[in-house]
Structure formats: structure tokens, C-alpha cells
Image: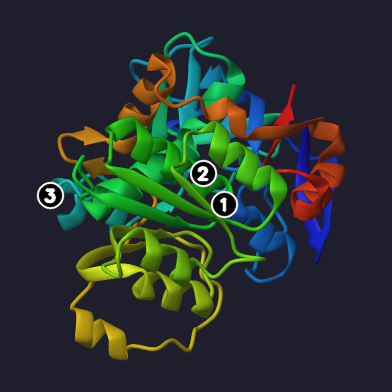
Amino acid sequence: MKAALYKGIREIEWQDVEYTPPAPGYITLQTRSSGICGSDLHNYFGEWKPSLERAAGHELCGTVAEVGEGVADIEIGDLVTAECFSHCGTCHYCVTGRYNHCANRKWFSGESHGGFSEYTTAHVNSVFKLPDMTFEQGALVEPLAVAHRALAQAKASYQDRVAVIGGGTIGQLCLAVAKAIGVRETLITTKYPQQADLARDLGADHIVDITTTDVKDVVKDLTDGMGYDAVIETVGTAQNFDDSIAISRRHAMIVLVAGYFKPLEVDLRSIVWSEVNITGSNCYGFSGMRTDFDVAIDLIISGRVEATKLVTHRYPFADIAEAFYTAADKKSGCVKVHLVK
């Protein structure tokens, strides 16, 4: 079969690899749509250390092609997506409903190839069967689940003003979830015209172009100096961390969901002064009584979140090198780049 492997910094190649049947407890799916995530770009830029032996890719959708020994309730032909990790189900975190912190957490495909391949292997406990939806919608369940988790961590409600720092995929989906749950007011920061256009289409109440405007001044005017009730930081720089605190009211919730790839020097004095609550958001799991994946599927099927609006570019899997080149250059007009079959 074919799969895409990193060959070096800014180098990824579609090449022949060996197909291996799924191990016990795993399924193999024919990959029909796969999104390029910000974390994939960290690998592409050499900021994180990628595997050179197996294909990455975790925003995926496809149909089950083969089922390993011991797998129940999943059949060949089922439409599925998957979380990016598997969990043991028996450790302290799993049995207390926090399986995203599993002590034995592993990459969802084990030692096999992920979503940047013709056939993806996935552990059965990472797999979600999908209702009738398109492959493109199915590949957007994973990033939407990340966004839902972030809003759940923020404990945002209809009374709250929510600000999102960053207009990329996760930032836009956080905005979409905030609108879907009916928060009082939304603000998002953007850097590129396509991000502002999309945020407007998703219903943002306020859009701040950080290339021309200081978000702190905007929030001060909008809130009479009080600040926002919840801030979701999706970018991962020291400036954005400091801005998140600066635009928050006292006792606000700040959720960090960015892909941090190096230590940051930040100003902690205002945390002491304002007593803001800062927490992380780790992928997805249970948020309340339901998994973030189940909620994300419902949000898409119901039309409350039109996630496919994020997809600006589509490439055949064989053109993955060009797809990454586009995804890495926001001046290309991209928000979300999908590989399709």
C-alpha cells in the first residue's frame, strides 16, 4: 500500500510500504479523508520529533476493511473515525472517567500507520462508528472534539463572554462550539483574511485582526475594562498567553489548548493579582456524562456546527507534499487542508 513518511524538515513523501493485517484488538480502515493538523505541522517544521517509520495523521475517516481478532460490534464496511490514542481501561484514570490521562496511553494505530496512508490501523477502543455523514465531516470530528473539550474545561455557559485567541482550525471550532452552546458573546483574534472571513461566517460577535489592532484595547472598550469570562488560547506563544490573562476578568477561566513546543517566558504577576483560573485541555475524553467525540458527532449531524466550512483546500493523498506546503503557508488562503480519496 502507499503511505506518507517524513523524510526530514519540510519533507514528506508518498511511498510504498508493507500492508500488515490488524493485530488482535485492532481494525484496519480504508482511509477516505484525512486532515492536516497543527501538530502535524510541528513535525513538518522539525519542532517536534516525528516518526520516520510510520505514517502520522489522526484527523481521519474511512470504512472498515479488516477486523482483528477479538473485535466485537465493528464490521467490515462500517463508517468510522478514531481518537488519536488508545487507553487500557483498567488504570486509575480510565476507571475514574479520565481515560485521556490513561497511564498506558498509546498512539491509536500502535506500531502501524496512521491517517496519512491508504489503510489506517486503529485500536478498537479509539474507534467511533459514525451515522450517515460524508467522509469530510467524519474527518472533522476529531478536531471538533478537541474544541468541545476546551469549552467544557472553560465551564462556559449562556451567561459568559468567551474570547478565542487564534483563528486556526481549533480556534475556529472553539468559536463554533461557543456559538452552538449559546454563550452570551464571542470574540476571536485572527491574523489572515481567510480566518476573519470564516469567523464572520461562523457568527463571531467580534473579530480582532492582530496585525493592525491590539486585542487588549478592544476588550477594554467592549467590557468597560472588566474583561472576558473565559479565554481559550490556541496559538502557543508567550505573547498570546500574556494577552489571554490581560483580557480576562478577575476569577476568569483560561484554557490552554495550544500545541506548545518550547518553554515560554511569561508574566505571572497578573495571575496572582486577578486570581484567574488557568487549566489545560488534553485532547478529549468524557466531558460530563458523554465523550467529546459523541458530542462532536451530534453537533455535525444536527447542523449546529457546519465544520466543513473550515476546509479550504483538498488534495489527493498522492499529492501530500503539495498539501503540506499549502497548509504550512497561511498566505495560501488555507484554514484546513484535507487529503481525499
Q: Which mark is residue 167?
A: 1
Q: Which mark is residue 107?
A: none
Q: Quadrant of the C terminus?
A: top right
The residue drawn where x is 15% and y is 34% is: 289
- Measured in 3D between alpha carbons, the distance from the residue under mark 1 to the one under mark 2, in whole angstroms, is 6 Å
* Total numbered badges shown on the rendered structure: 3
For disc 3, the marked residue is 96
The amino acid beneath tag 2 is Gln
Quick one: 275 or 323, which is closer to the camera? 275
On the image, which quarter does residue 255 sit in?
A: bottom left
The residue drawn where x is 65% and y is 58% is: 191
109 left or right of 318?
left
Is residue 19 at all visible to an observer of this figure?
no
**Does 77 sit above or below residue 110?**
above
The residue drawn where x is 40% and y is 39% is: 145
**Does 170 sit above or below residue 82?**
below
231 left or right of 60?
left
Quick one: 53 or 168, which is closer to the camera? 168
* Label 1 close to label 2 by CB (< 8 Å): yes
160 left or right of 171?
left
The residue drawn where x is 72% and y is 69% is: 46
Comes first in the chain, label 2 or label 3: 3
Is residue 127 at all visible to an observer of this figure?
yes
On the image, which quarter does residue 91 sit in?
A: bottom left
Q: Residue 80 location in percent, x, y?
A: 48, 22
Of marks 3 and 1, the one in the foreground: 1
For disc 2, the marked residue is 172
Comes first in the chain, label 3 or label 1: 3
The amino acid beneath tag 3 is Thr
Q: Residues within 10 Å of mark 2 (few under 14, many from 20)?
A: many
